[in-house]
Structures are given as C-alpha cells and as structure tokens.
Amino acid sequence: MLKKHMLALVALSSVSFLPMAQADEVVDDRFYVAPYATFIQPGGDRNMNSGWGGGLGVGKMLDEHFNVELKGFYQTLSGD
C-alpha cells in the first residue's frame, strides 16, 4: 500500500515541474508564411459543382498568446 502512495506522490510531484520547464521556452518572433488549400462542397438545392481554392498567410508572433496575420485567399465554384 505504501508503494502505491509513494508512486502517486512521485507522479504528482513530477507533473508539477512541467509548467516550469515550459516557461523556459523562447518565443520564436520571426515572420512566417503559411500556405493552405481549401475544398468547397456546396449543399442544399443549389446547382453548383465542387470547387477548389487556396491562400497564403503571412504573420509574426507578438508573444506566446498573440500573433498578427495577413491572409489572402482565392476560391472558385462552378455552376451547371
């Protein structure tokens, strides 16, 4: 029984050190580029075919919680 309590105590104490280890991480403040692709599947009674699109995002991290991004995108959808 004592071994189970000791194991639980060691597990809980090791988990408590995780936030301290994570706090030492350096925020990467370089600019980044994020390309992406999209697929459009229209629903309902529309007489439309599926379409493709894509875009590009450029951004910069301000801190670990906020970043600024500028995104542009293009999507196409064709009808019958």
Image (cartoon, grey):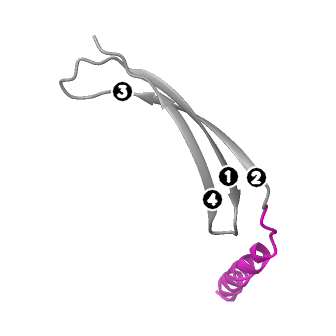
* Closer mark to the observer between disc 4 and disc 3: 4
Q: Secondary structure at mark 4?
A: strand
Report helix, strand or loop for mark 2: strand
Q: Quadrant of residue 9?
A: bottom right
Residue position for label 3 = 41
Residue behind mark 2: 31
| 70 is higher (above) or lower (below) than 39 | below
Task: Find out whether the residues at labels 4 and 2 contact each other: C-beta distance under 8 Å.
Answer: no
Discs 1, 2 touching: Cβ within 8 Å: yes
The CA span between labels 2 and 3 is 33 Å
Classify mark 4: residues with Cα within 10 Å, few (<14), some (14-19) or many (20+).
Answer: few
Q: Secondary structure at mark 3?
A: loop
Q: Residues within 10 Å of mark 2 (few under 14, many from 20)?
A: few
User: Would you say residue 70 sits in the magenta stretch?
Assistant: no
**Labelled pair 1, 4 in contact (Cβ < 8 Å):** yes
Report the disc number at residue 59: 1
Which residue matches tag 4? 68
Q: What amino acid is labelled 3 in the image?
A: Gln
Percent x, y of residue 61: 70, 61
Q: How many neighbours does mark 1 have within 10 angstroms: few (below 14), some (14-19), or many (20 or more)?
A: some
- Where does the C terminus fall, quadrant-wise? top left
Labels 4 and 3: the sequence-earlier one: 3
Counting residues from the N terminus, which is met first, the one under dot 1 or under dot 2? 2
In the image, the segment drawn in magenta is: 1-28
